[in-house]
Image (cartoon, rainbow, N blue to C red):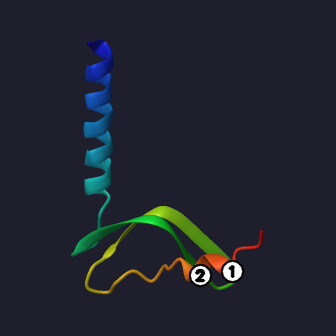
């Protein structure tokens, strides 16, 4: 029972942080590994929060730029 309460509290806390940290006017969420090349660096993530009007600039194809 205590385990369930703790899980619910963690989910509520995570959702609160995720929603309050959003400074995007028309937010959209995209899941899956995508990469974004910035100057000489490649930034990657599995969760992308972006403005739906501007679109997501990160793509799977840009992940090929990563040095392995």
Q: Which residue lies furthest to the top in this view?
A: 1
Q: Name the residue under label 2.
A: 62
Q: In which quarter of the image is residue 21?
A: bottom left
Q: Identify whether 23 is placed above or below 60.
A: above
Kindly state the secondary structure of the residue where label 1 is placed: helix
Q: In which quarter of the image is the N terminus?
A: top left
Residue under the image location 59 percent in, 81 percent down:
62
Q: Distance between the residues labelled 1 and 2?
A: 6 Å
- Residue 65 is tagged as 1
Q: Do the residues labelled 1 and 2 touch (CB within 8 Å)?
A: yes
Task: State the residue at coordinates (59%, 71%).
Answer: 43
x%, y% of residue 33? 51, 66
**Quarter assignment of residue 56:** bottom left
SS type, badge 2? helix
Q: In this view, does 7 lie above or below 39?
A: above
Q: What residue is rendered at 29% in x and 63% in y?
A: 22
36 left or right of 48 in image:
right
């Amino acid at each position: 029972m205590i385990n369930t309460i703790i899980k619910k509290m963690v989910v509520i806390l995570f959702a609160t942080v995720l929603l309050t940290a959003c400074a995007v006017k028309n937010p959209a969420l995209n899941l899956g590994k995508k990469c974004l090349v910035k100057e000489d660096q490649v930034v990657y993530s599995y969760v992308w929060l972006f403005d739906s009007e501007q679109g997501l600039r990160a793509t799977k194809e840009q992940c090929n730029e990563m040095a392995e």
